[in-house]
Amino acid sequence: MVATQKRATSQRAAIQAVLAGTDEFVSAQDLHAALRAEGSVVGLATVYRALQDMAAAGDVDSLRNRSGEVLYRRCGQPSHHHHLVCRSCGSTQEVAAPGVEQWARAVAEQYGYVDLDHQVELFGLCAACAAVRD
Amino acid sequence: MVATQKRATSQRAAIQAVLAGTDEFVSAQDLHAALRAEGSVVGLATVYRALQDMAAAGDVDSLRNRSGEVLYRRCGQPSHHHHLVCRSCGSTQEVAAPGVEQWARAVAEQYGYVDLDHQVELFGLCAACAAVRD
DNA sequence: TTACTTGCAAACGGTTTGCATCGAG
DNA sequence: CTCGATGCAAACCGTTTGCAAGTAA
C-alpha cells in the first residue's frame, strides 16, 4: 500500500495504473492523453488534482523540467534519491547522491536557513540519444 | 566586456544596470517593476527578450523556481557555483558544492550519459523570514 | 445522507509572438 | 537607408479554481 489516499475512485485508480506502468517521468498532460488513448475518459483537472494529492502524500516524485512543466513519476522507494534525466528521450535513472542531504543541512545551518528543501537533478543525453544525434 | 550582445539600446542598458546592481536572482517581472519604479519605461516583452538573449549569450545565470518563474542573475564568475535561495524573500547565498561536479561526472559516465548539465539549488527560509513567520 | 470527487469551462499567471513603428549602425 | 529592437496587445500553455452534479462510504 502506498500511503494515505483520499477516496477510492475509478479515475484515481486509472491514474495510478498508468503511473505504475512506467518508469519515466510524465507530465499531467501526457498522463491525461495516455488515459484517453486507452479509453479512460478522465478530466484534465482531475488528473492534476490527483497528481497533486499523490505528490503531497509522497506517492509520486515530481520535478519541473526545463520548459516549466511538472513531471511525475511513481516513487519506488521511500528513500530519497535524485535523477539523471535524458534531455532528449526523457528516460531517467535514479541515482544516489551520497552526502547531498548532509551537505545541504550543513550549508543551511551555516547561513541560518531553515525548512530546507533541495533540488538536485542531472540532465544529459543518454547513450542511445547521443548516438542518434549527428 | 560581457560576451556578445545584439545592439546597444537604452532599454538594454537599463536592464543590465539593474542586474549589475544586485546579487539576487530576479524574475523578469521583478526586473520590469524595478525599471518602472526608477522611471525607465520598458515593455515587459522587451525585458523578456533581453533576458533571454543575455542568458543565451551567457551573461546571466537563470534558474526556475518552485512556482515556475524563471529567475535571472548577473553571472559574476565563470566559476560554477550553486545557490541557497530564500523561498520567501528571494535573497540568495552562493554556496560551494564540493564534489558535486565530480559526482555528476561520475554518475553520468556510469550510465553512459553525455553532454551533462546539472541543477543543484537549495531552497529554505532565511533567518529573517523564519523569524517573521508566526 | 453527507461530504468528497469529478467534469467543465472560465480564470490565471508567466511567457511568447505578430505587427507596425522606432532607431542604431 | 536597413534591419534589428521595441511596445502593445493578443495569443499561448500549463495549471488552478468555482460550481453544479455525481458517488463512495
Image: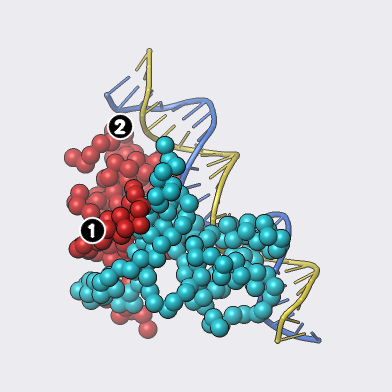
Chain colours: A red, B cyan, C yellow, D blue
**Where does the image place residue A48, in percent across and percent down from the top left?**
41, 44
Q: Earlier in the sequence, mark 1 or mark 2?
A: 2
The residue at 47%/66% (across/down) is B62
- Mark 1: few, some, or many residues within 10 Å (few <14, many ≥20)? few
Secondary element at tag 2: loop
Q: Which residue is depicted at the point 43% across and 48% down?
A: B128
Q: Nearer the viewer, residue A102 or B66?
A: A102
Quadrant assignment, res B35: bottom right
Kind of residue at disc 2: Arg
Q: Which residue is mark 1?
A: A102
Q: Disc 1 to disc 2, how far (Cα)? A: 37 Å
Q: In the image, which is nearer the foreground, mark 1 or mark 2?
A: 1
* Above or below, comparing residue C14 to residue D1 in the picture: above
Please, is residue C1 above or below residue B104 in the view?
above
Look at mark 2 in the image and give the residue it sits on: A7
B13 displayed left or right of B99: right
Give the image location of residue A58, x and y in percent: 27, 45
Q: Position of residue B111 (x, y in %)?
A: 22, 72
Q: Chain of mark 1?
A: A
Please tell me which residue lies in front, B47 or D16. B47
Q: Amino acid at mark 1?
A: Gln
Q: Which quarter of the rendering shows the N terminus of chain A?
A: top left
